[in-house]
Image (cartoon, rainbow, N blue to C red):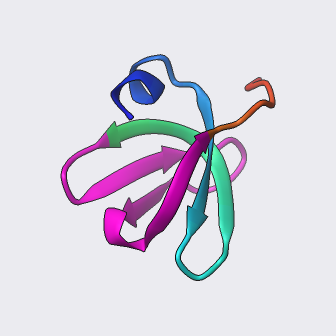
Amino acid sequence: MKSLGEKQKPVIIKLADGEVVRGWIEYYDRNMVRLTREDQPNLFIFKHEIMYIAEDGGKRK
């Protein structure tokens, strides 16, 4: 996660309820992740709600 955040790589986050969100990790700590998205509100996601985080193959504008 450190590398993804530092390089602002696009990621896909799948949540425990099955929802998938895309953006880049701007900040994280031991309890949550801040996901920044283009043309949509930023999200603060608790880590216990995340099933997985994967690097997105798509390009960020």
> In terms of depth relative to the viewer, which is nearer, 26 or 12?
12
Q: Quadrant of the N terminus?
A: top left
> In terms of depth relative to the viewer, which is nearer, 27 or 49?
49
As for residue 45 lying within the magenta part, the answer is: yes
Region rendered in magenta:
28-54
Q: In x, y percent, where is residue 58?
A: 81, 31
Image quarter of residue 32: bottom left
Q: In x, y percent, where is residue 12?
A: 64, 48
Residue found at the far right of this picture: 58
47 shown above or below 16: above
Residue at 21 percent of width and 47 percent of height: 29
> In terms of depth relative to the viewer, which is nearer, 41 or 9?
9
As for residue 47 lying within the magenta part, the answer is: yes
Q: In x, y percent, where is residue 17?
A: 58, 82
Residue at 60 percent of width and 43 percent of height: 54
Residue at 22 percent of width and 60 percent of height: 31
The answer to whether residue 12 is left or right of residue 49 is right
Residue at 58 percent of width and 25 percent of height: 9
Residue found at the far bottom of this picture: 17
Q: In x, y percent, where is residue 14?
A: 60, 62
The answer to whether residue 57 is left or right of residue 24 is right
38 shown above or below 13: above
59 shown above or below 36: above
The answer to whether residue 45 is left or right of residue 55 is left
Residue found at the far top of this picture: 7
